[in-house]
Amino acid sequence: MAKSEAYEKGQQIRREMMGDELVEKLATTVYADPVMEKFGEYATEAVFGLLWGREGLDRKTRAMICVISDTCLHCWPELELHVRFARRMGWTEDEITEALLHVGGYIGVPTIREAMIIAGKVFKEMNEEEGS
């Protein structure tokens, strides 16, 4: 079946946000299951194609919104992805850390502690991948 224009746009944005390596890894792990494959197609079209593809906010800002919303909602697996997105879109480790600390004043220290652990893990992985 032919993919929609929003799906094609979403696939391009998804690759730009995640990088080819992570997209391929997810395709052969998380999205290899037929049920999750359907979810992946939906998310590519609806989230990346329609939301991330909208005008009005740049991708850098959208990435930080995702980091903050994941933290507030305790969406830890998504936070790992979105911290990675935020770094790829130009946010520094210090800026992400500061944003998380700021949110801690509103949502609580235990939640931010978990988010900081996850962010630190992602920072370390990305630094190793980049050879830093």
Image (cartoon, rainbow, N blue to C red):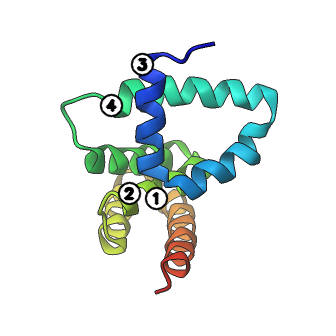
Q: Which residue is mark 2?
A: 86
| Residue type marked 3 | Glu
Residue 131: % across, % down = 50, 84
Q: Are marks 4 and 1 in contact (CB under 8 Å)?
A: no
Tag 1's secondary structure? helix
**Residue 92 location, quadrant:** bottom left
Residues at marks 1 and 3, CA–CA distance in whole angstroms:
27 Å
Q: Single out the mark in the foreground, 2 or 3.
A: 3
Residues at marks 2 and 1, CA–CA distance in whole angstroms:
5 Å
Tag 2's secondary structure? helix
Badge 4 density bin: few <14, some 14–19, many ≥20, Cα 10 Å:
some
| Residue type marked 4 | Gly
Which is more N-terminal, label 1 or label 4?
A: 4
Q: Are marks 2 and 1 in contact (CB under 8 Å)?
A: yes
In the image, 109 versus 119, the foreground residue is 119
Say left or right for 21 vs 45: right
Residue 76 makes an appearance in the image: no
Tag 4's secondary structure? loop
Residue at 53 percent of width and 57 percent of height: 111
Q: Which residue is mark 3?
A: 5
Which is more N-terminal, label 3 or label 1?
A: 3
Disc on res. 95: none
